Image: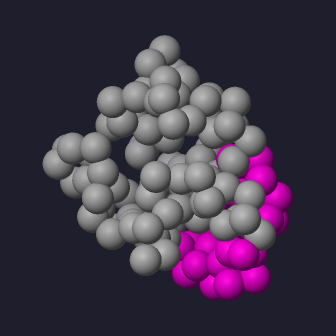
């Protein structure tokens, strides 16, 4: 089975610790990260599909703008050297994290509400 995920979720889901907006949202993430392969997609993905902030196929969160989410997706794919449409194994993704995570943290994690969850 494969998950369909957007760029920034390739990075962020590696730090998932069982927190989220609702039990349904958390359960969905657990099922997504339980899949062996990931198909990289553009725009809303399997995680977004269960997010209460997804409105008219865009993020309506007060914390993030849809433009910021799209920028995160683009930068995640650049850093990980992947393209939309590729199918990759979770292990390949996680193996690339050590070389890119510091740049990612500086660019996107410092103002993220999940920073403490991900990095303590």
| Magenta stretch, main secondary structure class | helix
Image quadrant containing the C terminus: bottom left
> Does the magenta segment cover residue 37?
no
The stretch of residues the image draws in magenta is: 73-102
Tell me if residue 1 can be seen: no
Image quadrant containing the N terminus: bottom left
Establish if 117 lies above or below 63: below
Q: Position of residue 63 (x, y in %)?
A: 51, 36
Residue occupying the point 54% across, 53% down:
112
Q: Nearer the viewer, residue 107 or 29?
A: 107
Residue occupying the point 49% across, 15% down:
56
- Quadrant position of residue 50: top left
Q: Nearer the viewer, residue 116 or 84?
A: 116
Q: Position of residue 114 (x, y in %)?
A: 44, 58
Q: Position of residue 78 (x, y in %)?
A: 82, 58
Tell me if residue 51 can be seen: yes
Establish if 57 lies above or below 41: above
Q: Nearer the viewer, residue 88 or 28?
A: 28
Q: Position of residue 79 (x, y in %)?
A: 79, 65
Question: So how many labels did they put on this image?
Answer: 0
Residue occupying the point 51% across, 49% down:
4
Residue occupying the point 59% across, 52% down:
111
Establish if 81 lies above or below 83: below
> Does the magenta segment cover residue 101?
yes
- Quadrant position of residue 70: top right
- Quadrant position of residue 92: bottom right
């Amino acid at each position: 089975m494969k998950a369909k995920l957007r760029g920034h979720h390739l990075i962020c889901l590696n730090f998932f610790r069982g927190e989220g907006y609702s039990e349904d949202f958390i359960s969905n993430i657990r099922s997504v990260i339980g899949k062996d392969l990931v198909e990289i997609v553009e725009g809303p993905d399997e995680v977004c599909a269960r997010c209460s902030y997804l409105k008219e196929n865009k993020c309506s969160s007060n914390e993030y703008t849809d433009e910021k989410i799209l920028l995160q997706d683009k930068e995640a794919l650049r850093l990980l050297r992947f393209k939309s449409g590729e199918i990759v194994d979770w292990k390949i993704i996680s193996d690339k994290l050590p070389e890119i995570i510091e740049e990612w943290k500086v660019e996107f994690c410092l103002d993220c509400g999940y920073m403490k969850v991900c990095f303590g």
